[in-house]
Image (tube, rainbow, N blue to C red):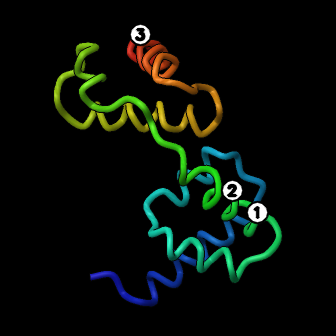
Amino acid sequence: MISKASCIIDEISLLKDLRRGLSRDLVYDKLKGLDLHQIVYFYLLSRGKAKRNLGIYIFEISRIKLEINGEDVKALGVEEGPRIRELLEEVMKAKVRGEVGNRDSQISYLRKLLRG
């Protein structure tokens, strides 16, 4: 069981990280596992760069969705397993950075990842 003190320490560490100038994909990495309500709570209490980064996540990044899924990855020859999730995560980060847009560009990026 995770203690309340441990959770508070993790939240303080997260807010310290968010005070730095972070790229969009790092903001995504830091916040993707948290509940949106918790992120909004931090946003309301924050200021400066932390508030800016939280706002970017709330108003922009959290709305980004992939147009591909695991079936698309399997269609390119990847076997069922954790590698599919890893590849989709890489495509998502590319979309967050603005490197890919529509379904076709996501598939092209996925092919590029698979070529190494």
Disc on the earlier residue, 3 or 1: 1
Residue found 47% across the figure and 16% down from its top: 104
Give the structural element (helix, strand or loop) at label 2. Answer: helix
Q: Do the residues labelled 3 and 2 touch (CB within 8 Å)?
A: no
Q: Kindly identify which residue carries mark 1.
A: 52
Task: Kindly state the secondary structure of the residue where label 3 is placed.
Answer: helix
What residue type is disc 1 on? Arg
Q: What residue type is labelled 2?
A: Ile
Q: Residue 62: image x %, image y %?
A: 54, 54
Q: Which residue sits furthest top?
A: 115
Q: Are circles 1 and 2 on residues that touch, CB within 8 Å? A: yes
Q: Mark 3 points at which residue?
A: 115
Q: Residues within 10 Å of mark 1 (few under 14, many from 20)?
A: some
Give how far across and how far down residue 16 sits, in percent: 68, 70
Residue at the spot x=61%, y=44% of the render?
25
Picture disc at residue 90: none
Residue tagged 2 = 56
Q: Which of marks 3 and 2 is nearer the N terminus?
A: 2
Q: Is 27 in front, or is 69?
A: 69
